[in-house]
Amino acid sequence: MDSPQPQLVIIGDIGADLVMGPIAAWPQIGTETLMDRSELRGGGSAGNAALAIRHLGLQARLISAVGNDDFGRWLREQFHGLHTALQVCEVETTVSVGIMHSCGERTFFTTRGHLEHLSYAHVLEHLPPASVPGSIVLLSGVFLLPSLRARYPALLARIKALGYEIALDTGWPGHQWDAATRLEVEGWIARCDHLLINELEATSITETPDLEAAMQGLAGLLPPGASLVVKAGPRGALGIQQGVRLESAAQQATIFDTIGAGDSFNAGYLLARLRGASLRQAMDAGCESAAAILVRFPRRQIQAGELAACVAKSIQQEGEIA
């Protein structure tokens, strides 16, 4: 009989994403603009990470919510092959329209919808004890989940009590960063084993424009032995663990659709960690998986497990064990 393996649970936001583009300039009000590409797919920070995990050949549990409408029924179907526990909320499903710009940036329009109703009780009901040490819960999209956010300290404590490591991707608060939000997030960081954020989030949380200083400040907030990872776009990823600073280079690729880049990185990183990889190997795997996923458009055509080799390659490479 096979021994139990570390498991991954993803708790956070999912929604229906319509990605369109590119446009060279914002159109005049009242006009119509024709675009070359579009794709309707499951999205959200947690949704993107869960789908990326499926692309990479790992089974994960996804705990989230959908609305009770046609989009909600369609959205549930997008996560086939994963263990899902989706609360059906008696509201419309959250929908995002992502407009891709020729310069590589993107603009989002998002409805509030079901995400405001994902409950703490639903999450606890569907969160089993960790199968073995080294299992991980990824928390993402918290600022889009006000009902769950109100119980975040209790949720973090419960996750730890069930035997999991905690990975956190904070995302961006809709009201911008203020003193109260920074203090709240610092409390979450103090319980994390893996903090996975981008450059702007790092400098915003610490109120410093200097990324290196921000990283040192964030590393000081984490528990001993925890890993800080800063996703730096074209630069790749920067990390600190036990005072050792590491870098992983981004893979060179021509990319039209950058939506979910950080979430795809998270998937590769976490898959590598579940397999016992070091911080450096896991950051390399995150960069590899992000590049492999982002070059695909439409992404719904990626088959389950199709991209597993890119993570295995990173783990097998010789590297410093941080």
Image (tube, grey):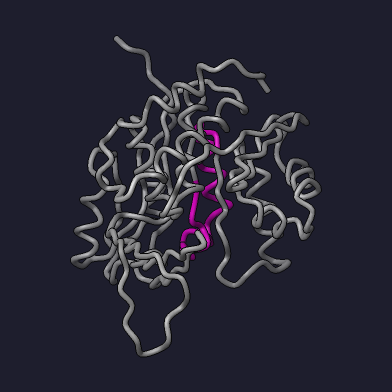
Question: Total label count?
Answer: 0
| The magenta segment | 139-166
Residue 116 in which image quadrant: bottom left
Q: Residue furthest bottom?
A: 30
Q: Position of residue 191 (x, y in %)?
A: 63, 42
21 left or right, relative to 271: left
- For image coordinates 56% across by 46% down, the residue present is 168
- For image coordinates 67% across by 36% down, the residue present is 239
The kind of secondary structure the magenta stretch mainly shows is helix
* Residue 20 shows in the view: yes
- For image coordinates 37% across by 50% down, the residue present is 47
Q: Position of residue 100 (x, y in %)?
A: 43, 64
Q: Position of residue 258 (x, y in %)?
A: 46, 53
Above-or-below relation of 90 to 171: below
173 left or right, relative to 56: right
Task: Point out the image quarter for the C terminus.
Answer: top right
Q: Residue furthest top?
A: 1
Between 156 and 48, the residue placed more toward the observer is 48
Task: Point out the image quarter for the N terminus.
Answer: top left
78 left or right, relative to 60: left
* Residue 12 shows in the view: no
Above-or-below relation of 25 to 146: below
- For image coordinates 41% across by 54% down, the residue present is 257
Q: Position of residue 311 (x, y in %)?
A: 45, 27
Above-or-below relation of 280 to 320: below
Decide whether residue 50 is among the magenta residues: no
